[in-house]
Image (cartoon, rainbow, N blue to C red):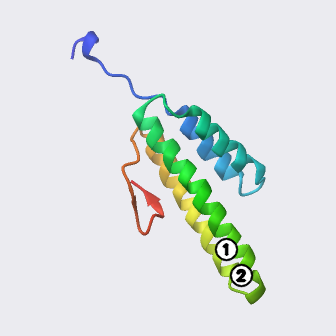
């Protein structure tokens, strides 16, 4: 390749920051809210970045819905199992997405019932 034909890797730092905020959200929940806001603001720069940000935004909203379901069903005891599922589901999504972002790859879909990004 000549210098004029070189391609630059997309800047995925915003996605990595959001993944980090989501990971810290397991200890300080407020960082998850900051992460989703940042994901909305950072969209529109690059298609590869947008694939990660869309995945992260979906992760937030699905997590919120599952958390509400877990909270409501805690009365009958099943909520605790749903909380455990949510913790594992979210952690796998954050890790798999971060690894793809770290490699400069887009998210093309999910596998294993939406748990893992590929």
Q: Which residue, given by chain and number where applicable, does mark 1 sit on?
A: 69
In which quadrant of the rendered view does residue 105 lie? top left
Give the residue at the far left of this rendering: 1
Where residue 92 appears, x then y in whole percent?
Answer: 53, 61
Q: Is residue 28 left or right of residue 114?
A: right
Which residue lies at the image location 56% right of the left edge and 56% below the top edge? Answer: 59
Where residue 110 appears, x then y in whole percent?
Answer: 41, 59
Q: CA distance from mark 1 to mark 2?
A: 6 Å
Q: Is residue 57 left or right of residue 99?
A: right
Q: Quadrant of the N terminus?
A: top left
- Establish if 61 lies above or below 79: above
Which residue lies at the image location 66% right of the left edge and 41% below the top edge? Answer: 37
- Establish if 115 lies above or below 9: below
Q: Which mark is residue 73?
A: 2
Label 2 crowd (10 A; few <14 / some 14-19 / many >=20) = some
Where residue 114 appears, x then y in whole percent?
Answer: 45, 64
Disc 1 secondary structure class:
helix
Q: Which mark is residue 38?
A: none
Which residue lies at the image location 41% right of the left edge and 68% below the top edge? Answer: 112
Disc 2 secondary structure class:
helix
Tally of numbered tags: 2
Give whichever of 27, 68 is nearer the camera.
Answer: 68
Where residue 56 appears, x then y in whole percent?
Answer: 55, 49
Label 1 crowd (10 A; few <14 / some 14-19 / many >=20) = some
Q: Is residue 85 left or right of residue 30?
A: left
Tag 1–tag 2 contact (CB < 8 Å): yes
């Amino acid at each position: 390749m000549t210098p004029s034909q070189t391609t630059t890797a997309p800047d995925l730092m915003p996605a990595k920051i959001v993944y980090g905020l989501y990971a810290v959200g397991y200890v300080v929940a407020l960082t998850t809210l900051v992460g989703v806001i940042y994901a909305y603001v950072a969209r529109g720069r690059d298609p590869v970045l947008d694939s990660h940000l869309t995945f992260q935004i979906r992760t937030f909203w699905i997590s919120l819905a599952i958390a509400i379901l877990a909270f409501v069903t805690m009365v009958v005891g099943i909520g605790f199992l749903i909380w455990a599922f949510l913790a594992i589901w979210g952690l796998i999504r954050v890790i798999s997405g971060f690894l793809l972002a770290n490699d400069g790859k887009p998210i093309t879909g999910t596998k294993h019932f939406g748990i893992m990004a590929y």
